[in-house]
Amino acid sequence: MSVRSKSRTSETANKNNDQMWKELNEKLPWRSTPADSAKREEIWKGFDVNGNGYLSLAEVDKGMRDVVQLPVLFEAKPVLMRAFMASKVLAQAKSAHSDEYITKGEEFRHCLRFLR
């Protein structure tokens, strides 16, 4: 492979990487701003399909595919699992099920943050 070919390949990879990060930043509103909070509210409604106020790992997984529409995260099961596990323990349990699921609010916000 010539130096020019390597350079073009590297430039293409950087553009693809930049595009992926741009898409992640747009679709995963994790900041503590009113605009991001409003976006998270809409995303939560799409993720919490049974309306119980909790998200299971399966609901987060499905939400990445169907609601947020980020195939790169849907295909990255270890990343989803780690983000889920790390975020579900951030808030003190409010019920017997709270420690097994992600709750609305800070846990969900941090899950989106960790997925970035």
Image: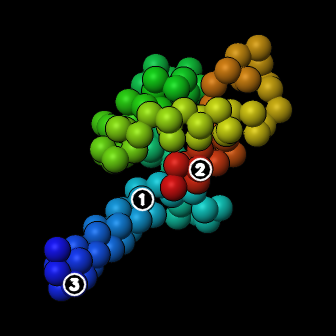
| Mark pair 1, 3: CA separation | 31 Å
Disc 1 marks a residue whose amino acid type is Leu
Query: Residue 111's quadrant in the figure?
Result: top right
| Mark pair 2, 3: CA separation | 37 Å
What residue appears at the point 44 percent right and 44 percent down from the top-left corner? Answer: 43
Q: Tell me how the rendering is colored.
A: rainbow
What residue appears at the point 54 percent right and 23 percent down from the top-left corner? Answer: 56
SS label for mark 3:
helix
What residue appears at the point 68 percent right and 38 percent down from the top-left corner? Answer: 86
| Residue receiving disc 1 | 24
SS label for mark 1:
helix
Relative to residue 61, is residue 34 depicted above or below? below
Disc 3 marks a residue whose amino acid type is Val
Sequence-wise, the earlier of marks 1 and 2 is: 1
Q: Residue extending furthest front?
A: 1
SS label for mark 2:
helix
Contact? badges 1 and 2 (CB < 8 Å): no
Relative to residue 44, is residue 95 depicted above or below? above
Dot 1 alpha-carbon crowd within 10 angstroms: few under 14, some 14 to 19, many 20 or more: some
Residue 30 in the image, given as x and y percentages of width and height: 57, 56
Nearer to us of marks 2 and 3 is 3
The answer, for residue 8, to whether it is visible in the render is: no
Instruction: Depth check: give the residue in front, 33 or 107.
Output: 107
| Residue receiving disc 3 | 3
Residue 83 in the image, given as x and y percentages of width and height: 59, 40
What residue appears at the point 59 percent right and 50 percent down from the top-left corner? Answer: 114
Residue 91 in the image, given as x and y percentages of width and height: 78, 37
Dot 3 alpha-carbon crowd within 10 angstroms: few under 14, some 14 to 19, many 20 or more: few
Instruction: Depth check: give the residue in front, 95 or 74.
Output: 74
| Residue receiving disc 2 | 114
Disc 2 marks a residue whose amino acid type is Phe
